[in-house]
Image (spheres, rainbow, N blue to C red):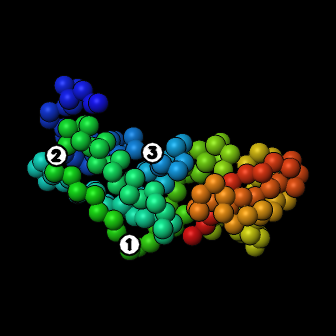
Amino acid sequence: MVDTATIPRDPVYDDKSIRKVLEMVKDPEIPVLTIEDMGIVRNIEFEKESVQISIMPTYSGCPAMDVIAEDVKSMLVLHGYKNIEVKTVLSPAWSSDFISENGRKCLEEYGIAPPVSAGSKAAMIGIDAVACPQCKSIKTKVVSEFGSTACKALYKCEDCLEPFDYFKCV
Ligand SMILES: [Zn+2]
């Protein structure tokens, strides 16, 4: 149970304060990433005592979206915000390029290979290689298109022989 006495009575309805609260919401599938790192938050609107948050679904059919919407709502409630609406916007579509630099770093530290982005070294030399998060080797191969969740593929490194999850590009 939440101790209602600790809920602030006068939250500030401005972009900075609301964003700060959103930064505390983690991605339910990848708990090292916040939804800000994932680039899911599309828009923040607010008036006197009301907040509307627009979020982008990541992978279609990802059951995590409902969880994220609920988490956003309850985190704002916990900080005293009222009249919260969380909308899902489908356009423009989310792409793995929205993941922030910090987010990519966290993914790698967590042992998940971040999506190969358009600007990455591998993409520039024209290979669709996924680097091993352990030893950085690009001698990797896909074991299964579906890893621990539908958003990830299971890979294996042929140098250090470690299996790892690859966060699929969309
Ligand atoms: Zn390796």
Q: Between marks 2 and 3, how big is the CA–CA gap?
A: 21 Å
At label 3, the amino acid type is: Lys
Circle 3 SS class:
loop
Residue at image mark 2: 82
Disc 2 crowd rating (10 Å Cα; few below 14, some 14-19, many 20+) is some
Disc 1 crowd rating (10 Å Cα; few below 14, some 14-19, many 20+) is few
Residue 17 located left or right of residue 110: left
Name which quarter of the figure residue 42 lies in: bottom left
At label 2, the amino acid type is: Lys
Circle 1 SS class:
loop
Q: Which mark is residue 65?
A: none
Q: Position of residue 50 (x, y in %)?
A: 15, 52
Query: Residue at 46% across / 60% down in the picture?
Result: 63
Q: How many marks?
A: 3
Q: Between marks 1 and 3, how big is the CA–CA gap?
A: 21 Å
Nearer to the camera, 89 or 68: 68
At label 1, the amino acid type is: Leu
Query: In the picture shown, does residue 134 fall above or below 100?
Result: above
Confirm if mark 2 falls within 8 A of ligand 1.
Answer: no
Residue at image mark 3: 26
Residue at image mark 1: 90
